[in-house]
Image: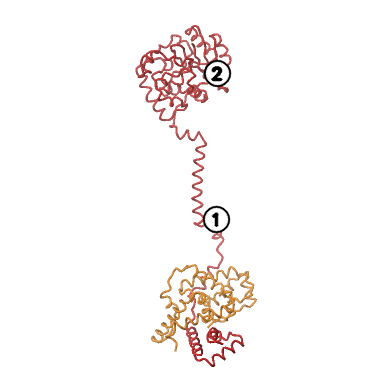
């Protein structure tokens, strides 16, 4: 599910810290979908997610010179993105509604129409179920089950205790199980 | 391990995120608890559903948008951003500045009498050299005479029209007063067009602003002209006009002071101002008037006004300041004299009022 790491090779980090435009562009190309993915799952709106994702990269660009490399680049970017999303949700800076946005997330594929309908329905139910989760649980399940981060990485990204991550993830999954009961075999 | 404790750890059990001993305990509980086994299966299926979600992809053009936004702005944009403040800062600052400028303007206006005067005065008043000397006279002196009831007789008009006393006191007439005096004087002078000099024939009928200043203090406040008393309260000024004697014959001999060019000038000349007031006790007023005229001419001065009253003759004159001392000393020849008022810093042309009695 996750794209190949661009790598935190020292040479690449040096180029980034030196402000090399090509290196930053490479960083954006590598992490754009992950950053955008977290934003759109958290905010439920593509336009808002694009705005937040762009802001996350710009903040990273401004702070790259000070990036020490203690954490992985991906973890660092997830941390910036998560914070921006949670801040925006907390401040109520929601300009657009989420309704109807789910369809934007579906990939146009060569599926049979009935499969596509079934898939669209499941995705809509999933997106709705995720959107209905409390924000602090939602971010944990997004990072774990959609982005594939380890518990330790999630704890680092969100600056939480490992036990808190475990507990929140369990409650989030239990909520989703109840909401998605009809799709379960 | 209870079912509650086991279920709290099922999610981590699925992810293999438990410590080995905890994992062992959960596994042992699951072997003997079908309910918890079912719960674990439902959780696993739920996570599988989540994994079926297609990964979100950033929209086309996202990379270009981000790199363009991250590109440093051209120098002129940065300069413009530094120079021009945003509206959130600019608007309150401008509003404050506007208020400050307005307050400053009011302050400067209030503190600058010249500005106040120019705002009040009508434009274009033709100047006469004598007017300048009259205007330059100190305010305090004439004000004192105008206001001090014990200083003696005041002008007939100011007595006859007590309601206009306040107007008499003003040194500089307002625009409205000037217009008033300019429009009234011709009417008053019309009945006596043959008068040789409007200031020689006392302009008693002129508005108070024109005559009040020429009235110096008289020792006896009650010594108003009897004719005025007889006339009663109405139109005393006209009565005085009739009582006023004709200009003395000696008038022709004195240095010819410039006659007022216009009624406006007459009104202006009469503006209350004097640099000195001197009283002279004489035995023969007619002789004293002649001697005084000669004396004024000798010191290079000029007589600017004369009015004969019942018990005194009021002579106004302008004397050059360098010869003013000589002039006052020579007054002793006329009789016992006394300087009743004199401003300390005399101007180049001293405007003196002499009362012969």
Q: Position of residue A179 (x, y in %)?
A: 44, 82
Give percent across and percent down for residue A134.
49, 75
The residue depicted at 54 percent of the width and 58 percent of the height is: B80
> Which residue is labeled 2 in the image?
B320
Indicate the position of residue B217 as horizontal and vertical percent values: 48, 17
Query: Disc 1: which chain?
Result: B
The spot of residue B234 in percent (x, y) is 35, 19
Residue B357 or A121: which is nearer the viewer? B357
Residue under pointer 1: B83
Q: Is disc 1 surrounded by few (<14), some (14 to 19) or many (20+) residues within 10 Å?
A: few
| A22, above or below A183, in the image | above
Residue B337 seen? yes
Q: Which of B306 and A64 is in front in this view?
A: B306
In the picture, the disc for residue B119 is none
Which badge, 2 or 1, comes first in the chain's sequence? 1
Residue situated in front as seen by the camera: B324 or A128: A128
Q: Can residue A107 be seen in this view?
A: no
Q: Which chain carries label 2?
A: B
The chain displayed red equals B
Q: In the drawing, does residue A159 fall left or right of residue B123?
A: right
């Amino acid at each position: 599910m996750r794209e190949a790491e661009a790598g935190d090779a020292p040479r690449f980090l040096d180029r980034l810290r030196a402000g090399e435009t090509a290196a930053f562009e490479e960083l954006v190309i590598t992490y754009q979908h992950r950053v955008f993915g977290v934003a759109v799952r958290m905010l439920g709106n593509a336009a808002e997610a694009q705005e937040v994702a762009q802001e996350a990269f710009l903040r990273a660009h401004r702070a790259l010179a000070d990036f020490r490399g203690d954490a992985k680049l991906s973890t660092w970017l997830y941390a910036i993105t998560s914070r921006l999303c949670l801040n925006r949700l907390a401040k109520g800076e929601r300009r657009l509604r989420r309704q109807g946005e789910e369809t934007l997330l579906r990939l146009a594929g060569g599926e049979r129409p009935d499969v596509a309908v079934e898939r669209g329905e499941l995705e809509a139910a999933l997106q709705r179920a995720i959107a209905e989760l409390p924000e602090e649980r939602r971010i944990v399940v997004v990072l774990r089950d959609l982005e594939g981060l380890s518990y330790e990485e999630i704890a680092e990204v969100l600056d939480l205790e490992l036990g808190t991550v475990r507990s929140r993830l369990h409650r989030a999954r239990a909520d989703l199980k109840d909401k998605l009961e009809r799709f379960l075999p | 391990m209870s079912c509650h404790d086991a279920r709290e750890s099922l999610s981590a059990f699925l992810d293999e995120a438990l410590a080995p001993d905890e994992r062992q305990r959960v596994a042992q509980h699951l072997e003997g608890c079908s309910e918890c086994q079912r719960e674990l299966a439902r959780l696993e299926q739920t996570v599988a559903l989540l994994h079926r979600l297609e990964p979100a992809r950033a929209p086309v053009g996202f990379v270009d948008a981000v790199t363009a936004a991250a590109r440093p702005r051209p120098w002129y944009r940065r300069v413009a951003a530094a120079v021009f403040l945003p509206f959130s800062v600019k608007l309150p600052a401008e509003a404050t500045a506007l208020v400050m400028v307005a307050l400053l303007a009011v302050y400067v206006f209030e503190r600058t009498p010249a500005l106040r005067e120019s705002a009040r005065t009508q434009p274009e008043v033709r100047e006469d050299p004598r007017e300048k000397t009259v205007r330059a006279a100190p305010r305090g002196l004439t004000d004192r005479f105008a206001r001090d009831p014990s200083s003696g007789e005041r002008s007939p008009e100011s007595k006859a029209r007590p309601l206009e006393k306040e107007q008499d006191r003003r040194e500089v007439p307002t625009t409205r007063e000037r217009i008033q005096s300019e429009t009234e004087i011709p009417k008053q002078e019309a009945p006596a067009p043959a008068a040789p000099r409007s200031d020689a024939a006392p302009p008693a009928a002129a508005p108070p602003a024109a005559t009040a200043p020429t009235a110096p203090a008289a020792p006896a406040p009650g010594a108003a002209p009897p004719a005025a008393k007889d006339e009663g309260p109405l139109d005393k000024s006209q009565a005085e006009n009739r009582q006023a004697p004709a200009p003395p014959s000696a008038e022709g001999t004195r240095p010819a002071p410039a006659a007022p060019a216009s009624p406006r000038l007459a009104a202006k000349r009469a503006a209350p101002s004097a640099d000195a007031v001197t009283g002279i006790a004489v035995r023969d007023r007619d002789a004293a008037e002649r001697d005084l005229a000669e004396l004024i001419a000798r010191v290079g001065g000029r007589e600017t006004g004369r009015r004969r009253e019942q018990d005194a003759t009021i002579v106004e004159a302008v004397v050059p300041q360098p010869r003013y001392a000589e002039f006052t000393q020579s007054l002793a020849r006329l009789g016992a004299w006394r300087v009743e008022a004199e401003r300390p810093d005399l101007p180049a042309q001293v405007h003196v009022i002499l009362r012969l009695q």
